[in-house]
Image (spheres, grey):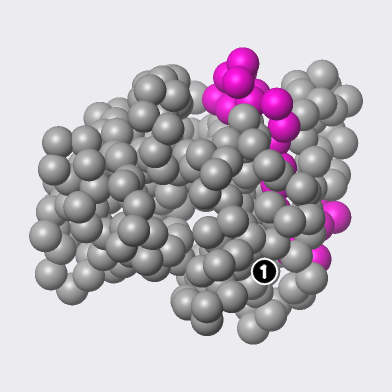
Amino acid sequence: MDALILCGGFATRLEPITLFVPKPLLPIGGRPIVDYIIENVANIDEINSIVFSTNQKFYDQFEYWLEHKKANGVTNKIKLVVEPAMHEGEKFGAVKGISYTIEKAKLKDDLMIIAGDNFYNFKLDKMLSYFKKTRKPTIALHNIKSREEARRFGVVALDGDRVTGFEEKPQNPKSTLISTGIYIFPKESLGLFKEYVSDGNNPDAPGYFMQWLLKGTEVKGVVHDEEWFDIGTLETYSEVFNKYLKEHND
């Protein structure tokens, strides 16, 4: 299995700080956000390689971060794929970025995909074990317990363990179960990303891809009860930053 960490966005909602630092490298608890993701993923025996997709603007910063990680012996599984984008108007969007990276990195195995702005404290073993049993595309879900908050995310309808609906940022959410931006896809389905993009569909939020996928593919959902944050706004980043700063100092 390979892992793909999505870091190709420009995080305009967090400007001005993200004019200079990519969101996945923003610090929480004295460490970049992606350090926590790598710490989790690199310890999974099934993961053979970890690919970071980033953009041309922030490539140097990710390269510096990666050299530091390798120098400290954290992992030698990581490599970078760079999208040729220097600003928001040139960005590929998440789904097109996934398709591009699959091709550039020649990914042919089962694939775990994680949004690089994810901050969570659950292990992915539960989701991975479930995927190995079903061999179906699988989404890690979180119950945000607020329909108002759910409007900011991809909202999932679940029947048992089967995903029966997926709405990207709906005005009237049908549930409070949301996608965490963590997915596992069997290798047989990787070509669907290119098919989706080639058909002229929305290349950005993965939720649109999931809506399209559900029309002909069975998708599973695994709910995680532990903490999860989407570092999508300055308010959320400030909340999480201060929470972990306090815990670190305590």
Q: Is residue 241 left or right of residue 16?
A: left
Image location (x, y in percent) of residue 43: 61, 18
Q: For the C terminus, which image quadrant?
A: top left
Kindly identify the residue that appears in the image at 38 percent across and 23 percent down.
133
* Closer to the camera in the image, 197 or 127: 197
Q: Amino acid at mark 1?
A: Leu
**Image coords of residue 100 (percent x, y):** 69, 62
Camera-side residue: 210 or 56?
210
- Quarter that holds the N terminus: top right
Q: Is residue 125 left or right of residue 45?
A: left
| Span shown in magenta | 40-62
Helix, strand or loop for disc 1: helix
Residue 50 shown left or right of residue 46 in the figure: right
Q: Residues within 10 Å of mark 1 (few under 14, many from 20)?
A: some
Residue 52 sits inside the magenta stretch: yes
Please report the residue visible at 76 percent of the width from the left and 74 percent of the height from the top.
Answer: 86
- Mark yes or no: residue 22 visible: no
Question: How many marks do you count on the picture?
Answer: 1
Nearer to me, 34 or 103 = 103
Question: As rendered, which of 93 and 107 lies closer to the eye?
Answer: 107
Q: Which residue is mark 1?
A: 19
Residue at left offset 37%, top offset 42%? 139
Give the x, y percent position of residue 243: 39, 36
